[in-house]
Amino acid sequence: MTALFGTKYFGFILSAYGITAAVLIVLTVWIFTTHTRRKQQLAKLEEAGLKRASRSNG
Amino acid sequence: MTTDAVKQPRGLMALANPTRFLAFVQIVLPYLSLTALALLAVGLWMAFSVPDDYQQGRTVRIMFVHVPSVWMAMSAYMVMVSGALGVLVWRHPLADVAARAAAPIGAAFTFLGLATGSIWGRPMWGTWWEWDARLTSFLVLLIIYLGLIALWHAIEEPAKSARMAAVVVMVGALNIPIIRFSVEWFTTLHQGPSVVRSGGPALAPEFLYPLLVMGLAFLLVFLTLHLMAMRNEILRRQIRTLQRKAARDHRTGNSK
């Protein structure tokens, strides 16, 4: 692997990979936390006695 | 003939049912996400093992995140076009779910394409930004994505928002060939196509293979995130239905 540290364009390469990693991580965490929050909301509604159509006749 | 003999949809058609789709996502997601991570690791290792380019030096490594981001930005839009067709032709709610779930992911990849392109452009072109045809049409793609996300949030009634967004998606699709061919139709600072072009890829194999591996890794990342986002959208609709049912029951004095 070619050494990159301290080279002329190291900052540009690091920024490009850094911003890509940051955006993909934030996107994944946002989608994941949304899923957790919605599952909790749905569970609360079902606890309150409300049933989804796909479960009410089963 | 009994009622049990009613034909059940098979294969991909069976997935058009949200409940079956959620079960499918539950099974597929772990394998898909692990494969995406493994391929991303291999792609990154390959990307940092390439020799320096004779013109671009070490900055050629930015290509391995810039180009796949651009591919995914445009692929996400094509997923939205398919979803829009599903809404307008078959009026299937899962088609709107697919289109709506792809929008923020497509916007994120479009932002990445613009940001990494700008970072790459500074040392290579001597400028962060130029209002040329490729860069401007790609910025327009980001604006379309943001506009669509706003539209979906602005209209409460699902069927109406689905139809309106589908029309905007189809109109916005005109921008995709403009992005693709802008480097051929206009004089731009951006280089011409070097992978998908007549006469085969212009890239040397030592750069092409890492790029294809990173492209495949980004595709799997996109598919993983899209399936997760579709699952979230289905849950949102189920919550909305139950909340409306609760409000209706409350008005009529029914406890259940």
Image (tube, coloured by chain):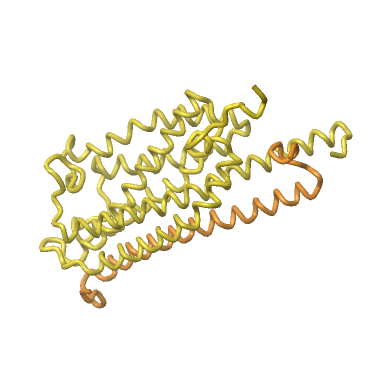
Quadrant assignment, res B116: bottom left
Q: Quadrant of the N terminus of chain B?
A: top right
Which chain corresponds to the colour yellow?
B
Which chain corresponds to the colour orange?
A
So how many labels did they put on this image? 0
Query: Where residue B73 appears, x then y in whole percent?
Result: 36, 46
Q: Is residue B99 left or right of residue B66?
A: right
In-front residue for pair B168/B32: B32
Q: Is residue B52 left or right of residue B31?
A: left
Quadrant assignment, res A51: top right
Query: Where residue B185 appears, x then y in whole percent?
Result: 18, 34
Write the residue at 45% across / 48% down: B105
Query: Where residue A35 appears, x then y in whole percent?
Result: 60, 53
Quadrant assignment, res B249: top right
Q: Is residue A6 above or below residue B53?
A: below
Write the residue at 66% across / 52% down: A39
